Image (tube, rainbow, N blue to C red):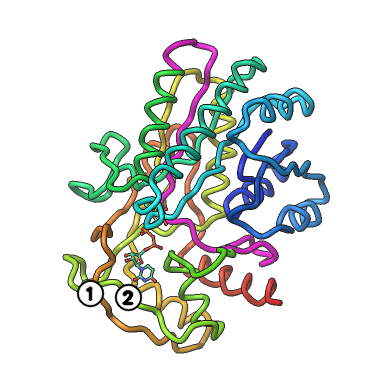
């Protein structure tokens, strides 16, 4: 199995789940967006080797040689730029990198004669949904260049899958991954100031920052703050293992939501972390963040039924594991 972006937060947890399920793992990562070292910990935790290659997934020749040299039979393509705000400022970087790497990986797979492809998509393709929970059949319409790259890659996958029935393509639409492996030894460690809620709450809990800025409390939600479907990263990565197994018997293009199916508000998340840590998390209500939506919650019924996959970990568990990973990886 080749995992592009395998050294990142979701990539390293995916490598762990794949190794535990008996797969071999090759990671290709350029380390622009993550710290080094997570995959060595994954090898240590599983007692199995991860082949770690430094390089860029936009390089089709490199990807093809990795596939051939390591006898790869399937690719999970996670490598991407992922900051929504940055994508608005630097759209060309996002289109060049995210579309370029997806096309390069598909070109390399075709040239090498391997056909099983899993893609890290995002609930962001739904834009501001008409209603929640959101099924895969809902209208899509991403609201920023980052989301558009996910949407456009899904279109590319659909068209490529239709062109040759050897392709087995699965797009997994992630909701909001949080938490960490129970060991706490691999963590979400964004480079620079966190954009996302959980890493920000963790920074305040560990004293790196003074308070959480809560982006708006005037949304049409129960407490006025934004509601999201936070999914434990271990549940999320187990969804990839299930998708790969499902693909063995299904050709064509499939799309699945990977979410919990229930919503948690910003304030509820802060309260959950306070309960787990016993700390007070100072926060301040500030203006809405441009581009944010009120609510985004998955309908995971299709993945439950077709992949035989369901989440098993609670939001409290995710908070406890995120907190545990802060202390276990500190320093
Ligand atoms: N929030 C705050 N303060 C912060 C950070 C976030 O109040 O410091 C709020 C947001 O307004 C939102 C919620 O917390 O209501 C979650 O925000 P995140 O930034 O953690 O996550 P988003 O739902 O905005 O974005 C995530 C991913 C994107 C992806 C999107 C939809 O980061 O990559 O889900 O799938 F596109």
Q: Quadrant of residue 135?
A: top left
Residue 167 is left or right of residue 288, and the answer is right
Element under disc 1: loop
From the image, tell me which residue sits under label 2: 214
* Magenta-highlighted residues: 161-188
- Numbered disc 2: secondary structure: strand
**Count of numbered circles in the view:** 2
Q: Name the residue: 32% across, 53% down.
A: 297
Residue 298 visible in the picture:
yes
On the rendered image, what quadrant is the C terminus found in?
bottom right
Task: Please report the residue visible at 54 percent of the width from the left and 68 percent of the height from the top.
Answer: 192
Residues at circles 2 and 1 in contact by the CB criterion of under 8 Å: yes
Q: From this view, report whether residue 308 is shown above or below residue 30.
A: above
Q: Which picture quadrant has residue 74?
A: top right
Q: Is mark 2 within 8 Å of ligand 1?
A: yes
The residue that disc 1 covers is 217
The image shows residue 217 at horizontal and vertical percentages of: 22, 74
Mark 2 Cα shell of 10 Å, populated few (<14), some (14-19), many (≥20): some
Q: Is residue 249 left or right of residue 216?
A: right
Magenta-span inclusion, residue 247: no
Within the magenta stretch, is there residue 162?
Answer: yes
The image quadrant where one finds ligand 1 is: bottom left
Asked which quadrant contains residue 24, the reply is: top right
The correct choice, above or below, for 211 with respect to 267 in the image is below
| Residue plotted at (53% across, 51% down) | 235
The quarter of the rendered structure image containing the N terminus is: top right
Q: Position of residue 286 (x, y in %)?
A: 27, 78
33 lies left or right of 96: right
Camera-side residue of 16 and 291 = 291
Distance from label 2 to label 1 (Cα)? 8 Å
């Amino acid at each position: 199995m080749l995992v592009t972006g395998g050294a990142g937060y979701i990539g390293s947890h995916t490598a762990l789940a794949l190794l535990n399920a008996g797969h071999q793992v090759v990671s290709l990562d350029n380390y622009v967006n993550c710290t080094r070292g997570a995959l060595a910990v994954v090898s240590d935790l599983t007692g199995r080797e991860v082949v770690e290659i430094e390089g860029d997934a936009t390089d089709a020749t490199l990807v093809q040689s990795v596939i051939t040299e390591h006898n790869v039979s399937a690719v999970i393509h996670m490598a991407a730029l992922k900051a929504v705000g940055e994508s608005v400022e630097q759209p060309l970087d996002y289109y060049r990198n995210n579309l370029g790497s997806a096309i390069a990986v598909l070109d390399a797979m075709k040239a090498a004669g391997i056909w099983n492809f899993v893609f890290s998509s995002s609930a962001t393709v739904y834009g501001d949904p008409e209603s929640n929970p959101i099924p895969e059949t809902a209208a899509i319409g991403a609201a920023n260049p980052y989301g558009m790259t996910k949407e456009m890659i899904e279109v590319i996958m659909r068209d490529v899958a239709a062109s040759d029935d050897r392709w087995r393509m699965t797009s997994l639409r992630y909701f909001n991954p949080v938490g960490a492996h129970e060991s706490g030894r691999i963590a979400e460690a964004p480079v620079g100031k966190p954009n996302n809620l959980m890493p920000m709450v963790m920074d305040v809990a560990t004293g790196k920052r003074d308070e959480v800025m809560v982006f708006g409390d005037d949304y049409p939600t129960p407490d006025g703050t934004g509601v999201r479907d936070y999914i434990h990263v271990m549940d999320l990565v187990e969804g990839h293992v299930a998708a790969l197994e499902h693909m063995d018997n299904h050709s064509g293009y499939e799309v699945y939501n990977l979410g919990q199916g229930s919503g948690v508000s910003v304030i509820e998340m802060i309260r959950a972390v306070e309960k787990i840590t016993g700390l007070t998390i100072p926060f301040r209500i500030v203006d809405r963040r441009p581009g944010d939506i009120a609510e985004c919650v998955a309908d995971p019924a299709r993945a439950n039924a077709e992949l035989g996959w369901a989440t098993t970990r609670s939001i409290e568990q995710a908070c406890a594991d995120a907190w545990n990973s802060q202390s276990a990886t500190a320093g």
